Amino acid sequence: MDSEPKDVIVLGAIKQGIKKFEKIQKMTQIEPEELNSILEQLEDRGFIQTKEKKGWFGIKIEIAITEKGVNEVEQRVHELQTKWNQMAMLYKTGDKEKLEQEMENNKGIIPSLMFFGIMDMMMFSMMFSMMGMAMSDYVPPENMPDTGNDSMDGGDMDGGGFDFDIGF
């Protein structure tokens, strides 16, 4: 799994209760044309379904995740968690060379690790310190989490206080 496809992040956003195209687009920072294509593929695969609802200003389209889609997200999040655990273990054992290789091999999943709140940002930053690298070598500054203050508060990221711009 060299890179995490954007469809998993889109599916994750829908699983979190985002039902409207504009809100999914804003949350994932995926261009509208590409997002439309991803949504069509997810619907073709049976992961989502669209529903038309009558509103004050005409018909609204809402997007809902199916049970098959929920299972897919859960499986992919489990895979991401496993990858993160491998990197964390390499950090804890102090194997700088293997950690650097593992991080390089999994560079593409970093936005997904952040989006799903899997990675511990404090440990992630310490990994870079151990390797003598800057986080910006892997994550562009505009994609870095905004903690709302000048300090990182670490811990398991459960979405509290962190604002991510995935920016594909």
Image: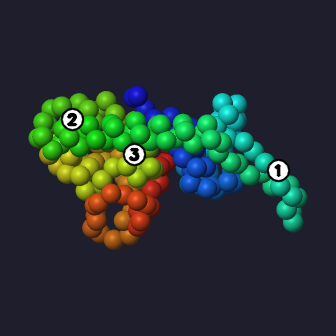
Residue 84 appears in view: yes
Q: Amino acid at mark 2?
A: Glu
User: Looking at the image, which is closer to me, 106 or 156?
Assistant: 156
Residue that badge 2 annotates: 100
Query: In whole angstroms, how far apart are the C-alphas of marks 2 and 3?
Result: 17 Å
Q: Tag 3 or tag 1, which sits nearer the N-term? A: 1
Query: In whole angstroms, how far apart are the C-alphas of marks 1 and 3?
Result: 33 Å
Instruction: Residue 2: give x, y in percent of width and height.
Output: 39, 29
Figure quadrant of the N terminus: top left
Instruction: Residue 136: give x, y in percent of width and height.
Output: 31, 47
> Which residue is at the far bottom?
149
User: Looking at the image, which is closer to me, 85 or 9?
Assistant: 85
Residue that badge 1 annotates: 52
| Disc 1 + disc 3, Cβ < 8 Å | no
The image quadrant of residue 69 is top right
Name which residue lies at 45% across and 56% down.
164
Discs 2/3, front? 3
Q: How many marks?
A: 3
The answer to whether 125 appears left or right of 1 in the picture is left
Name which residue lies at 65% across and 42% down.
66
The image quadrant of residue 58 is bottom right
Give the numbered dot on residue 113.
3
Q: Tag 3 or tag 2, which sits nearer the N-term? A: 2
